[in-house]
Image (tube, rainbow, N blue to C red):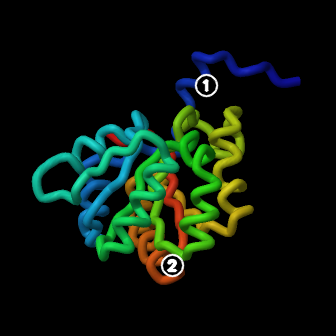
Amino acid sequence: MTTPQTPAAASTAAPVALSISGEALANAIKALGVTHVITVPDTYIKSTIAALETPGMPKMVYACTEDEAMGINAGLYIAGAKPMMLVQNNGLYACLNTLKTIALDATVPTFILIGQYLRDVTKTVEDNKPRAVRLLEPTLQVWDVPVFRLEGPADLGNVRLAWELAQKNNGPTAAIVGAPTN
């Protein structure tokens, strides 16, 4: 018989997901040629947002809802810009209808960087209790949205892969940030 882990023991477990520097993630975004980052501010990726607010970075556009962000992304794309979205996992669930209608049905390239709010980084995504964490990838896969994980600095190349696939397929892709950026 095993003894249940105490919260103190759980907090000392080795992380499965490692923090990525907000500056490194912002520089990876800039290197893509992104012109605008549409965001509903996310505390999980707040250091990335702060780094993107510095001179020389893509223009930040703040939206009130993820539905609004999806519409702004489409409008900027139609106007010739190269936008992307930065949201939280809970917000992605809130905009599934616009994801379907705009990104999928209207075939708008939509690269979405998603923070995994509430994730216990000492556990795999699949072993996390919050539904918002566990069900994000399966939800996106049901809609045929390609998913890329950013579980640490070694995965920064997935940002470019996700961006390029969204452009090539004229549709959505998601890169999920597994640990809070620092």
Q: Is residue 153 left or right of residue 112?
A: left
Q: Nearer the viewer, mark 2 or mark 1?
A: 2
Q: Is residue 14 left or right of residue 62?
A: right
Q: Residue furthest right?
A: 1
Residue 149: % across, % down: 53, 58
The mark that comes first in sequence, 2 or 1, is 1
Q: Is residue 16 visible in this depiction of the protein? A: no
Image point 26% across, 72% down: which residue? 33
Pointer 1 residue:
10
With respect to residue 36, does 116 lie above or below?
Answer: above
The image quarter containing residue 154 is bottom left
Which numbered tag is attached to residue 170? Answer: 2
Q: Secondary structure at mark 2?
A: loop
Q: Which amino acid type corresponds to the residue marked 2 in the rendered image?
A: Asn
Residues marked 2 and 1 touching at CB (< 8 Å): no
Image point 43% across, 52% down: which residue? 69
User: Which quadrant, please, contains the C terminus?
Assistant: top left
Within 10 Å of disc 1 (Cα), the crowding (few <14, some 14-19, many 20+) is few
Q: Residue furthest bottom?
A: 168
Image point 38% across, 47% down: which residue? 39
Q: Residue furthest left?
A: 55
Front one among 98 and 166 = 98
Q: Is residue 69 visible in this depiction of the protein? A: yes
Residue 70: % across, % down: 47, 57
Front one among 48 and 35 = 35
Q: Which amino acid type corresponds to the residue marked 1 in the rendered image?
A: Ala
